[in-house]
């Protein structure tokens, strides 16, 4: 095992948490060491040793290291490449400043942690998973933190309505969240001035750049292995590259997507781990090897008290790919509402209108988000339909769940839409002739008026709707709205049974894109 | 809607938690009231009204109630029976004592809560889900609690090795846990004396009987509907009884088992809820109705800090039914070990050796038990195999999971067994010629000797095993043992590669049935 750096098998997902001090013990990040790998698996591990060339016809690798300046050839029968990915450093003016850091390994971590000691102001660039984790951890160190993200939301793989809670939590945690803006230049002085596209300037003693990665595949390219245009290594279902004696695994490879079968990349620890296992099995016991299934790409992030994550495809990705889909958003508590400390959860389900199969899901809330994502990732892996989601027998006792879990609710709600029991609206209809009926109790409707962009909203609470149908114009379509999307469903059923053309706003006010209304 | 009692749609799973005060607000237990059902769904709810007879040819139900003593016939097009189940009161001497309570509804709850105020000593009879919850909640009220269970374990549906943690927690919580014993008589005096089969006598100011339920189906039987010998109502996949105009749902019906297709009963809120939905759909929109899938029977219980639960079939049930199965037990932390507060989890997987499909699973631990049960329930619903479990893409960030979640590990471990990479032993082989090799570090092995029933145990730590193979007799089989079942797997691989006939003890010391060794 040839490793350029000093460490093997370190817990790179833990790096932000050591910087913030939530993980106190640095040695805990070294999941394995050369010594433990020798003792347990009899591996010959060579750290601080770089593979600089592959001689494919000769089946040998040239390595540099060990004693300084020394190089040697090492023969192989089979070779596995696990080079990983490098944080992107865009060629912006001033990018070379020593105050600008990226985070890939324990040494980067140590440098950022050291720089943070004296820093007062920190700018994190990139609102993805790592950027959000870094922002949270730097607040934990009592730094003044700005988080700059080019898109109008954090966690770009998710749909914007499902990241609102994380954004609120970041702001409430003290992060200066700058969305829809990007850095165009850095200028060093007493501080580093980050100039943004908007013209705004943000001062920093420390800049953490977390805008993504590119595969670290110069060695593979030089060896003539087949790469995609972005430099990812092409592999088959057994992790074999275009050379059948060379395998590759981890962040540097191109895998196939579970939903579409198209090539995709997943820079996550879980898949990397299993790819390594798949390569090893095919090398040593090809008789036992099974092709890797396509990648689903489940991911999760914590931001202070909030959690958000996704599995499978998002709505924006489905739309961009031109795939047909339907979307269902539901709200519920994370366990029985009558049991103390029930916390709100929001779940967005994407499903195939032709087959009912789950294509993707996103969940956000304060507690129990990971559980629902895992259930939905398993549902996607099993090809489950919305009907089967509705029927899942999930563990229920008051501290743990509900008789109808939010995953069941999502399935039931999607079935209702599929069966034509309700016509769900993803957003307020643009047609100005549509009557907007807010069916929340009068007090709620007055205290938090439904944000209808200046259009008229009639408040008829659900429990009196049957007796007040006369206040609505039967010749005009209606959209029923409420806080969570449940009472508006009941209202839509009543209205439909009474001859109205009616939609129900899916997910209610909470799923509305209007960020002023995200109060839980 | 005809209801004999004063309440509709109360949260019966919450009753123990109100008795113990963990749920403080009694009104929270009334999920719906006649008033809310009228307002929302326009239902005509009649409480304190009992259905006393069904005239099937005349399609009408005789009800008693409303004004005292009055009876009337109510006509139906379709009738739904949801009578539930009654706690069993066995005909033991002294069973009529007013100190002996069962728990079915809010009135029972109020009576037990009132009786608990003055009670010093409480005996809970029955170590199932309700019994364990009651014991925990009565400790919360600072009562002296004894829990009596006829079997040698609590939570009878689970396998005994998977309930050890709950039993330890009950004992540590102060519960006098009396296993393998049953009450044969009660005798009233200043206290109620519970006489046990063993001859032991336990005093109680309050007895809570929680030994199971029987279906409350006299009405259905008198109407000539088809019941099973135990009195459960037979229904089809649309919840129709033997009379196509009469449906039934909930604890009183016989459903079909998902794994075997055989009739079974599931007295749980989730399935009951969905059965009601299925019946309603078939009544009003038979064009949209789909048959209910078979029941999996996921269940969970909390006991102080511990949680345990199961989904699908247990090993004892598979064995009793004579089905072929294999069992795999793994241990891991509930999230990344390097992140603070990682807690141990143990997972037992039952799978079909012919197809690799998951047949059942049990999980126990301190945190994250519900998540794994839900993933495994979803896996069973999707017909997933051990290979697919190994490949599940579950949500991983350090606070939430691991790159290889324990569910993945269970799949990998089962695949290893299926593929012949390891020969797992469910328990220590009885053959006295088998060499027992404890591969834990010397310190652990000395501090907590492996309980081998007096047989010789050789301690050769994994990291020196390769150099100490000479200490073992190649002509005799070996079983490798360790704390969790992971290092014994590595040891077994090393030994097998060196020509030994070897097994690895699945799940390690922690999964051992020896209750003295359950320290986490």
Image (spheres, coloured by chain):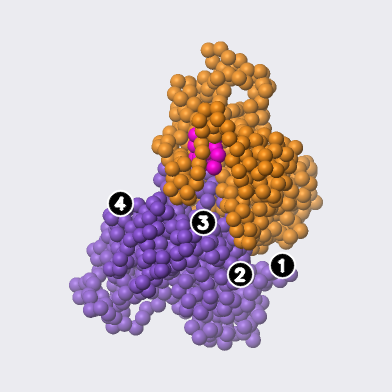
Chain colours: A orange, B purple
Q: CA distance from mark 3 to mark 4?
A: 27 Å
Which label sits in the foreground, 1 or 3? 3
Q: Which mark is residue B409?
A: 3
Q: CA distance from mark 1 to mark 3?
A: 40 Å
Mark 3 or mark 2, earlier in chain: 2
Q: Is residue A191 above or below residue A339?
A: above
Q: Which mark is residue B443?
A: 4
Q: Main secondary structure of the magenta part?
A: loop
Q: CA distance from mark 1 to mark 4?
A: 65 Å
Element type at marker 4? helix
Q: Which mark is residue B355?
A: 2
Mark 3 or mark 4, earlier in chain: 3
Range drawn in magenta: A1-13
Q: Residue furthest left?
A: B190
User: Which residue is pictured at 31% across the width and 77% down the height?
Assistant: B182
Residue A209 coordinates in the image, percent (x, y): 59, 28
Mark 3 crowd level (few <14, some 14–19, many ≥20, 10 Å Cα): many
Q: Residue furthest right?
A: A475
Q: Nearer the viewer, residue A459 or B491?
A: B491
Please report, as a chain letter, where disc 4 is located.
B
Q: CA distance from mark 2 to mark 4?
A: 42 Å
Residue B126 occupies quadrant: bottom left
Identify the image quadrant of the N terminus of chain B. bottom right
Q: Which mark is residue B438?
A: none
Q: Do discs 3 and 2 share a chain?
A: yes
């Amino acid at each position: 095992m040839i490793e350029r750096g000093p460490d093997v098998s370190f817990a790179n997902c833990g790096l932000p948490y050591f910087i913030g001090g939530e993980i106190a013990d640095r040695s805990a990040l070294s999941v394995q060491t050369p010594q433990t790998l020798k003792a347990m698996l009899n591996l010959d591990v060579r750290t601080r040793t770089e593979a600089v060339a592959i001689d494919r016809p000769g089946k040998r690798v040239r390595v540099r290291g060990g004693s300084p300046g020394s190089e040697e050839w090492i023969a192989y029968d089979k070779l596995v490449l696990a080079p990983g990915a490098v944080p992107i450093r865009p060629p912006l003016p001033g990018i070379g400043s020593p105050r600008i850091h990226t985070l890939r390994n324990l040494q980067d971590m140590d440098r950022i942690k050291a720089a943070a000691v004296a820093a007062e102001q920190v700018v994190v660039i990139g609102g993805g998973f790592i950027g959000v984790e870094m922002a949270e951890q730097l607040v934990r160190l009592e730094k003044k933190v700005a988080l700059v993200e080019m898109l109008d939301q954090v966690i770009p793989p998710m749909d914007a309505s499902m990241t609102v809670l994380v954004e609120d939590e970041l702001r409430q945690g003290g992060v200066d969240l700058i969305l829809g803006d990007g850095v165009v230049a850095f200028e060093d002085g007493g501080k580093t001035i980050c100039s943004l596209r908007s013209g705004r300037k943000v001062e920093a003693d420390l800049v953490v750049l977390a805008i993504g990665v590119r595969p670290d595949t110069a060695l593979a390219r030089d060896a003539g292995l087949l790469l995609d245009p972005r430099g990812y290594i092409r592999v088959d279902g057994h992790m074999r590259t275009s050379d059948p004696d060379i395998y590759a695994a981890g962040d540097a490879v191109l895998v196939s997507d579970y939903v579409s079968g198209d090539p995709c990349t997943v820079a996550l620890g879980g898949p990397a781990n299993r790819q390594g296992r798949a390569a090893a099995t095919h090398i040593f016991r090809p008789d036992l090897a099974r092709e890797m299934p396509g990648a689903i790409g489940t991911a999760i992030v914590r931001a202070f008290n909030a959690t958000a994550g996704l599995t499978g495809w998002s709505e924006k990705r489905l739309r961009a790919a031109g795939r047909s889909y339907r979307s269902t958003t539901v709200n519920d508590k994370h366990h029985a509402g009558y049991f103390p400390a029930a916390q709100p959860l929001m779940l967005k389900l994407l499903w195939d209108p032709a087959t009912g199969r789950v294509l993707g899901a996103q969940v956000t809330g304060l507690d129990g988000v990971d559980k629902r994502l895992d259930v939905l990732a398993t549902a996607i892996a099993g090809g489950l339909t919305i009907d089967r989601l509705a029927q899942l027998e999930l563990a229920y006792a008051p501290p743990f769940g509900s008789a109808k879990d939010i995953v069941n609710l999502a399935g039931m709600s999607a079935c209702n839409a599929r069966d034509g029991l309700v016509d769900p609206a993803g957003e307020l209809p643009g047609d100005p002739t549509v009557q907007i009926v807010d069916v929340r109790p009068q007090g709620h409707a007055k205290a938090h008026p439904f944000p209808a962009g200046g259009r008229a909203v009639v408040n008829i609470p659900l429990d009196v709707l049957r007796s007040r149908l006369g206040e609505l114009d039967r010749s005009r379509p209606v959209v029923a709205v409420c806080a969570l999307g449940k009472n508006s469903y009941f209202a839509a059923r009543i209205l439909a049974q009474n001859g109205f053309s009616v939609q129900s706003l899916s997910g209610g006010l909470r799923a509305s894109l209007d960020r002023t209304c995200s109060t839980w």
